[in-house]
Each structure stands twice: as structure tokens, then as C-alpha cells.
Amino acid sequence: MSPKKDTQKSAKSTTATSKKFKGFTDEERAAMKEYVQEMKASAQRGPRAEKADGESALLAKIAEMQEPDRAMAKRLHAIIKTSAPALSPRTWYGMPAYAKDGEVVCFFQPAQKFKTRYATLGFSDAANLDEGAMWPVAFALKALTAAEEARISMLVKKAVSED
């Protein structure tokens, strides 16, 4: 190998090693642990108990939240239950979520969960929100006004629609 190639190789390897994986944050590790606990609990209970137990777990998570996340989560819970009563409340990575046939359709990520400046209402690929070749699947929430509540209700209804 020529000296020039050795120099280039060294520069590349130095650049690559300076971008080491720093690992998961404490919040991410906690969310993963919560998910494992949720899966274990789900496997232990029967399918009939799933909806009641899921709602109890979801309401307990909401009660643990700090304001304004708690108030927003309570209101979202009411909107989602009214808009799509077929969805089963549960937790998902320690966050309030709503599932159809065992698959999460939407979830609420409180701002405090990952120390972000806004909460998030997210939809999974199980949600029927497709619009052409591109559509939003997550929405930042700073407050819930009547306009946001109406839009959320419409989105949730569309997410569970069969068309």
C-alpha cells in the first residue's frame, strides 16, 4: 500500500470511531422495560380480561403524569373512547395507547416521557390514515382546544375505518 492510501485509511477510521453509539437514554431504557412488563402481563391474563385490565393500566399511567400532560391525556382518553369505542385501551411502552384486534392504532406520548417540549399523538401503521403516497402519523400537542379535539376525533374515526 502506498503512503497516501495509508493516510486516507487512517482518516476514515478516525472519523468512524469518533461517531460511536452512545446508547439509549435513561427514558428510552425505562420505556423498553415497561414494554417488557406489559407483554408479560398481557400473556398472563386472558383475552376477556384484556380490555378492563388495559384501561386500568392506562388510567394508572395517566394518574402518574404531571400537568399539563395529565389533563391532556384524560381529555384524549375521553375523545378516543367516544370516537372509536371498538378500540381497547392499554399501555404501550408505558404510554396510553389504543388497540384494535391487539394491534396499537394510536398512542399518546406525554412531553415529560422523553423530556420534549410538546406531547405527541401518534398513529401506527395499523391506522387507516393513508392519503396518497404521504401522510402525517404524529401530531405535536401543546394544548387541546375545541378545534384540536374535533380534528383528533375525525382522525381516530378515520384510523379505525374499514375503507
Image (tube, rainbow, N blue to C red):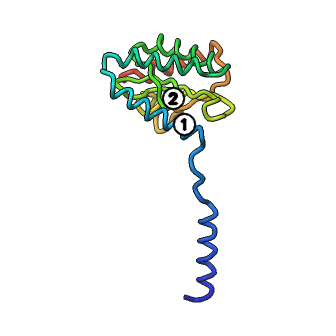
Q: Residue shown at 47%/13% (left/top)?
A: 81
What secondary structure is found at the residue carrying circle 2?
A: loop
Frontmost residue, 55 versus 11: 55
Q: Is residue 22 above or below residue 104?
A: below
Q: Are marks 2 and 1 in contact (CB under 8 Å)?
A: yes
Q: Residue shown at 59%/77% (left/top)?
A: 9
- Answer with mark 2 or mark 1, whichever residue precedes in sequence: 1
What secondary structure is found at the residue carrying circle 1?
A: helix
Identify residue for label 1: 30
Q: Residues within 10 Å of mark 2 (few under 14, many from 20)?
A: many
Quadrant in which residue 6 is drawn: bottom right
Identify residue for label 2: 94
In the image, what residue type sits under mark 2? Gly
Question: Residue 35 placed where, x, y %?
Answer: 46, 33
Q: Residue shown at 63%/70% (left/top)?
A: 14
Judge left or right: residue 6 versus residue 156: right
Question: Residue 40 placed where, x, y %?
Answer: 38, 31
Cα–Cα gap, marks 2 and 1? 8 Å
Judge left or right: residue 91 versus residue 68: left
Question: Residue 16 placed where, x, y %?
Answer: 59, 66
Position of the N terminus by quadrant: bottom right
